Amino acid sequence: GAGYVGSHCCKVFKQAGWKVVVFDNLSRGHREFARYGDLIEGDILDMDALVTAMTAVKPDVVAHFAALAYVGESVEEPGLYYRNNTVGTLNIVEAMRSAGVDKMLFSSTCATYGVPLRTPIDETHPQAPINPYGWSKLFVERMLADFSAAHRLRYVALRYFNAAGADADGEIGEWHEPETHAIPLAILGALKPDYTFTIYGDDFDTRDGTGLRDYIHVSDLADAHKRAIDYLLNGGQSDVFNLGTGVGTT
């Protein structure tokens, strides 16, 4: 809830009249962004802290954004990603079971698809990740399906394409350290004459030779998360949805 997508979602949740409680270790987020409800500082690898928080809050729905999300870092430090993203999610699901919480909204990724066999990519596209980050999320999707079958957990997994943009009110925005995303780096290049914006590749099979990405505004992502939670609260069964525009930008 102190990270990029999570904080924008928390704002929309609060605007919907929901009580928001954030559980975050602040390792990749910002305390200033956890401003839309109570903050419990804790780590998803700390099972005791998770169970204590889950039992005390007893949430109607757990919205899970607590992942590491740098593809390059996942290749260099795969253990970090499997431990936090996969084992950490297992901890969350077990803590939910112990507290009698049975609904989860999971922040997944289009990285579970790997190299596209066809475009646009839909939810039936084969999943064959090409990096540990994608695998760490795909393992979670498999885990959630198994827990759904065995323990009646109901979940929605949202496979993001490329989140971009910022809250229109200017309260929160994109703030990564280090910043690796193309749009904020392009803006940085426009604002700072001494910064060089680097384009990686000019020979792709696209209209201008540069890489093609499906960018979706983070506020549209947040709206989709609210709709997914409404779906679960209204009795919707476990499902997965892609979150993108279907239109690529070079």
Image (cartoon, helix red, strand yellow):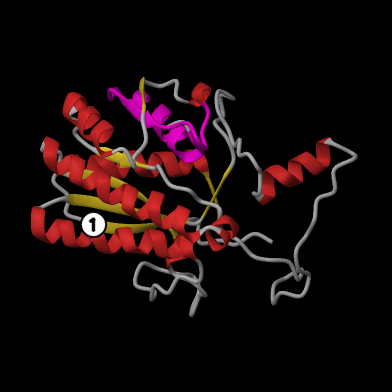
Name the residue beneath numbered marker 1: 144
Residue 228, above or below 142: above
Q: Quadrant of the C terminus?
A: bottom right
Q: Residue at x 33, y 47 (%)?
A: 88
Q: Residue at x 49, y 60 (%)?
A: 78
Q: Residues within 10 Å of mark 1 (few under 14, many from 20)?
A: many
- Residue 175 placed where, x, y %? 61, 35
| Kind of residue at disc 1 | Leu
- Residue 54 placed where, x, y %? 21, 32
- Residue 208 placed where, x, y %? 76, 68
Which span is picked out in magenta?
3-30
Q: Residue furthest right?
A: 193
Residue 171, above or below 157: above
> In this orientation, which residue lies closer to the viewer: 216 or 114?
114
> In this orientation, which residue lies closer to the viewer: 84 or 234?
84
Residue 244, above or below 97: below
Is 148 within the magenta?
Answer: no
Q: Secondary structure at mark 1?
A: helix
